[in-house]
Amino acid sequence: MTEQEIFFKLLQYSNELLENNKYLRKEDYEAYLALLKFLVRIENNLHYAEKDLYIELLNDFLDDKITAEDFSFSYIGIYEGISKKLKHMKRDFNNNKDQLAEFLLKPEQSEFGLLLARIYGDCDHYNPDSDSHLADEEELRNHARILLLEIQLNSAE
Amino acid sequence: MSKHGHNFGIHDPLPTNPKQKASPYLQPQTRTNVQNREQFFKNLNQFAQNPDLEVFKAVLIRGQLGRVYLCPETERVIAIAMEEPQAGTIIKAQPINEQQRTLLETQNKLD
């Protein structure tokens, strides 16, 4: 069985369980972890496909065209929006098989995915009214610089 | 957490930011405030009543230990601090994606 076939079989099983109010994690933990591995790869590739949106936003923030608060909200919007797109694709996978397969077969973007998740946490945490907002903004800027560099290095390969 | 009201039934969007660029992923921007906080916590309490929540104990959440409760159907989580000074307080309430879920499963971590 190919990787793609295994993925679709696991996804179908998970969806069938969901329809019966059952969850793959409880029913078969190993299968759940295997499916999660495939889904992370697809998700990171979906994010990577939108790298231009991230680059523009990161540059606007690092060039002080927008505030840390504006950046946080916009970043969360993009990040959650892409995750929502995958959620829709996996629940309705029969109509999204080609696209899922396409993103499954692209090279893994694991470092990119980890950085994105970390910055999401920074954005979620950032509050301009908090006592620690200056230090939080500096951390956010540092992570934003690293993400921009990671995307640029990746694009140059 | 305060930026995720719209994920937990708070439809109280902030005014549109003129600096916000057009994006296919635009979504309502909410911030919990004095007016909607009570309703927000009511909604979180309701979320916490779901018997299907999956519990992750001793998770490192931005440097502090907490418990994470995940709803497998809606793919949202809340996290409660276990350490002082915030012990017992909800410190996170947000949707969770595949990457974050993997970190939770394999490293007991939620940023």
Image (cartoon, coloured by chain):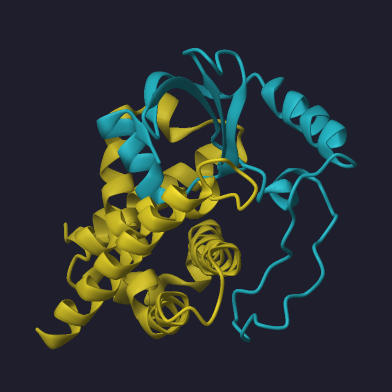
Chain colours: A yellow, B cyan
Spot occupied by residue A102 in the image (x, y as percentages of width and height)? 31, 77
Seen as rendered, the residue at the extreme left is A157
Above or below — where is B82 with respect to B36? above
Residue at 65% across / 18% down in the picture?
B51
Residue at 73% across / 43% down in the picture?
B8
Residue at 53% across / 69% down in the picture?
A78
- Residue nearest the viewer, comparing A131 with B7: A131
Residue at 75% across / 24% down in the picture?
B45
Spot occupied by residue A99 in the image (x, y as percentages of width and height)? 40, 76
Q: Quadrant of residue A130?
A: top right
Q: Quadrant of residue A2?
A: bottom left
Horizontal side of A88 relative to B3 (left or right) equals: left
Quadrant the N terminus of chain B occupies: top right
The answer to whether any part of residue A27 appears in the image is no
Horizontal side of B74 relative to B60 (left or right) equals: right
- Residue nearest the viewer, comparing B50 with A111: A111
Task: Give the tally of numbered discs.
Answer: 0
- Residue nearest the viewer, comparing B39 with A61: A61
Above or below — where is A40 with respect to A130? below
Spot occupied by residue A69 in the image (x, y as percentages of width and height)? 59, 62
Above or below — where is A28 with respect to A102? above
Above or below — where is A106 with respect to B43? below
- Residue nearest the viewer, comparing A95 with B5: B5
Quadrant the C terminus of chain B occupies: top left
Horizontal side of B82 relative to B106 (left or right) equals: right
Spot occupied by residue A70 in the image (x, y as percentages of width and height)? 60, 69
The answer to whether any part of residue A114 appears in the image is yes
